[in-house]
């Protein structure tokens, strides 16, 4: 009962159990955080708006994104992944979500940011429905912890509209 | 010659019986219980998360710095529709290894509710169309095995080491076997 093997087994089991408990408590502590992020996105310019050879509309935009996501960070946060998606409806598709830009915020210091960029990913429709289309821009964030449960949420900004004609 | 042969035979048969008794007996109850409880936890996780493989190990660096090689992801599959931003685990037709990337585009049909999904690893420059099967532009719901809902860092290295250097796996099994046979209980 007092051999090395038994002692090693007991110590390792206890260590692993304590580690598991600490990880779950770290993750649970994230639930006490009440985040209050703010964001604003402006479409500065429609760079071009064309129908591709395969019949799908494509548009290129320049966006101005300013946001303050510092309230999302807890001591258990490794990074926050943030992205902007354009969301709209077409006769064929009940929902289209296209990510336009994404970024990684590695720490609370970088969480209050302002960026001026063209869309990182191409906004291509399935079909030719984008002329005059009203769309929402949603800022999504995804909190990735050092250990445990991940949280995601979004802010929906409405009222954007694409031009009536190609350019 | 016959006498020695008989003696050797009797010794050998004694040892075999001893070994078998130990493997089956309560003397090794701790090893048996560990294996059984691991199996119960695994099957329980399969039920709770609704996924065939509730835990995956991150094998590549395509989701860094969020997920590094060797991290473990907990998966959950619900009937909720797949939306942009979710981290999903999927299989490409014809490839065994599951891939864990983020959904960046969703197109959901009005009538059938079926979806076309495009994924991309956070740390990759381009989207995953290069990884999909030849000619495939989108993923559908049936390709998705689950969503990543939580993670534990570093724990998956055990699996990676055992897969990439199988000699360590054999050494471990050999050592365990030796422990079972040589323990005096």
Image (cartoon, grey):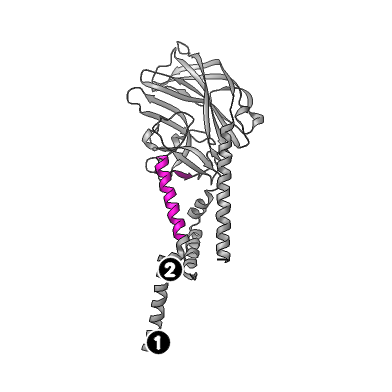
Q: Foreground: A61 or B49?
A: B49
Residue at the extreme left:
B112
> Which residue, given by chain and number where applicable, does mark 1 sit on?
B4
Comes first in the chain, label 1 or label 2: 1
Q: Left or right? Give the position of A158 relative to A111.
A: left
Q: Position of residue B77 (x, y in %)?
A: 41, 37
Q: Chain of mark 2?
A: B
Q: What distance separates the C-alpha of mark 1 from that of mark 2?
A: 27 Å
Nearest to the eye among marks 1 and 2: give it: 2
Q: Is residue A151 above or below residue B51?
A: above
Instruction: Sort mark 1 into few (<14), some (14-19) or many (20+) by Cα contacts within 10 Å.
Output: few
- Asked whether disc 1 touches disc 2, contact meaning CB atoms under 8 Å apart, the reply is no
Q: Position of residue A101 (x, y in %)?
A: 54, 26
Q: Place residue A80 in its image quadrant.
A: top right
Q: Position of residue A125 (x, y in %)?
A: 42, 22
Q: Place residue A104 in its image quadrant.
A: top right
SS state under label 2: helix
Instruction: Sort mark 2 into few (<14), some (14-19) or many (20+) by Cα contacts within 10 Å.
Output: some
Residue at the extreme top:
A164
Asked if the magenta segment contains residue A67, the reply would be no
Q: Position of residue B146 (x, y in %)?
A: 43, 38
Range of residues picked out in magenta: B31-57
- Residue found at x 47% / y 25%: A98
SS state under label 1: helix
> Which residue, given by chain and number where applicable, does mark 2 sit on?
B22
Q: Chain of mark 1?
A: B
Residue at the extreme front:
A1
* Residue A146 in sight here: no
Q: Foreground: A42 or B128?
A: A42
Q: Foreground: A35 or A145?
A: A35
Residues at marks 1 and 2, common chain? yes
- Residue found at x 39% / y 25%: B108
């Amino acid at each position: 009962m007092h051999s090395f093997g038994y002692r090693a087994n007991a110590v390792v089991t206890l260590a692993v159990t304590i580690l598991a408990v600490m990880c779950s408590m770290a993750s649970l502590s994230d639930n006490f955080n009440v985040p209050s992020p703010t964001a604003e996105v402006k479409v500065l310019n429609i760079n071009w708006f064309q129908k591709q050879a395969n019949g799908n509309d494509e548009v290129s935009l320049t966006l101005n994104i300013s946001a303050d996501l510092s309230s999302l960070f807890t001591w258990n946060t490794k990074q926050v992944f943030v992205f902007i998606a354009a969301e709209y409806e077409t006769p064929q598709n009940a929902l289209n979500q296209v990510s336009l830009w994404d970024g990684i915020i590695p720490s609370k210091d970088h969480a209050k940011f302002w960026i001026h960029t063209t869309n990182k990913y191409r906004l291509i429709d399935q079909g030719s429905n984008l002329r005059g289309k009203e769309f929402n821009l949603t800022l999504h964030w995804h909190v990735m912890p050092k250990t445990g449960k991940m949280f995601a949420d979004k802010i929906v900004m409405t009222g954007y509209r694409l031009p009536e004609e190609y350019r | 010659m016959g006498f020695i042969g008989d003696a050797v035979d009797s010794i050998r048969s004694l040892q075999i019986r001893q070994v078998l008794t130990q493997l089956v007996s309560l003397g090794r109850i701790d090893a048996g219980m560990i294996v059984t409880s691991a199996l119960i936890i695994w099957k329980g996780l399969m039920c709770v998360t609704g996924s065939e493989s509730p835990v995956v190990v991150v094998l590549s660096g395509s989701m860094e710095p969020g997920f590094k090689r060797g991290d473990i992801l907990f998966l959950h599959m619900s009937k909720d529709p797949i939306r942009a931003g979710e981290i999903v685990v999927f299989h490409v037709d014809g490839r065994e290894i599951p891939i864990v990337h983020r959904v960046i585009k969703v197109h959901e049909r009005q009538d059938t509710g079926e979806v076309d999904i495009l994924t991309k690893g956070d740390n990759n420059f381009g989207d995953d169309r290069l990884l999909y099967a030849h000619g495939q532009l989108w993923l559908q719901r049936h390709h998705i095995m689950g969503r990543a809902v939580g993670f534990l860092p570093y724990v998956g290295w055990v699996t990676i080491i055992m897969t990439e250097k199988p000699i360590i796996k054999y050494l471990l099994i050999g050592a365990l076997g030796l422990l079972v046979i040589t323990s005096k209980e």
